[in-house]
Image: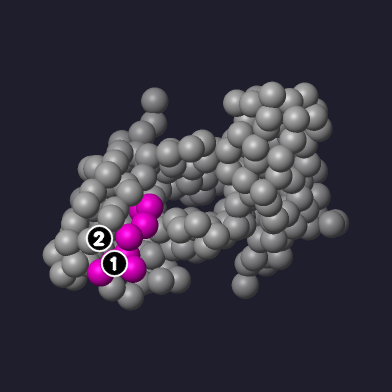
Amino acid sequence: GNSVTQMEGPVTLSEEAFLTINCTYTATGYPSLFWYVQYPGEGLQLLLKATKADDKGSNKGFEATYRKETTSFHLEKGSVQVSDSAVYFCALGGANAGKSTFGDGTTLTVKP
Amino acid sequence: DVKVTQSSRYLVKRTGEKVFLECVQDMDHENMFWYRQDPGLGLRLIYFSYDVKMKEKGDIPEGYSVSREKKERFSLILESASTNQTSMYLCASSSPGRANEQFFGPGTRLTVL
């Protein structure tokens, strides 16, 4: 079945540091890939997505590239801000009634 | 702006009570989901629905039931609440037309005393 393995947290960075959160997946077929972000006290919201191999998703300075050869979708940002502190979830889009597979989430704390 | 709303942000109930959590989406999405989120356990799927009156069990359906009488509304029911059901409950919806991206509600933090 499908699975997502996400870098364990928590991750603590100083403001303006470079961020990478690793995500690898196992899937049949060619699913869409997503990064969701959850700010404290809120639900998840889509951060970025990629629907086919070699696609790059980007939003708010975050980027991730759909790498079929390494089955990866790592999240990167060149310079993090305190406001980026949140929990980040990598996910596979599902073909079965849209049922997605989520990673366990990585908590990011950015200190001034 | 697309939206998923949940009936309560915070809820406190007593052990043994019947609890209803309501979720409404305004995007005409086919699929709807209920998750619970607990520290260290990530998101766990309770039930999902791919059409009106259709439902399927997720990974942890025990102690829960669901109802989908209208396309826009998906209800989670705790038949007899127990303290181990204290959790954050998240509702989501999706459509195949948008690569099954999931849209989440703000969550309901349920405490069972």
Q: Quadrant of the C terminus of chain A?
A: top right
Left or right of B10: which side holds A31?
A: right
Which residue occupies the extreme left position in the image?
B17
- Dot 1 or dot 2, earlier in sequence: 1
Q: Residue B61 placed where, x, y %?
A: 35, 72
Residue in the foreground of this view, choosing between A5 and A64? A5
Residue B77 in the image: above or below residue A90: below
Circle 2 residue: B112
Give the chain of mark 1.
B
- Label 2 environment density (alpha carbons within 10 Å; few <14, some 14–19, many ≥20): some
Q: Hey, which quadrant is residue B113 in on the image?
A: bottom left
Question: Pointer 1 and pointer 2: residues touching (CB < 8 Å)?
Answer: yes
Which residue occupies the extreme bottom position in the image?
B62
Q: What amino acid is found at the position of numbered circle 2 in the picture?
A: Val
The circle on residue B10 is none
Q: Is residue B85 magenta?
A: yes
Q: Which residues are magenta?
A: B82-89
Q: Quadrant of the N terminus of chain A?
A: bottom right
Q: Hey, which quadrant is residue B28 in on the image?
A: top left
**Residue at x 17%, y 61% (from the top left corner):** B14
Residue in the foreground of this view, choosing between B106 and B74? B106
**Residue at x 68%, y 30% (from the top left corner):** A111
Left or right of A15: which side holds B108?
A: left
Residue A100 in the image: above or below residue B9: below
Q: Mark yes or no: residue A56 visible.
A: no
**Inter-mark Cα distance, 1 to 2:** 5 Å
Circle 1 residue: B83
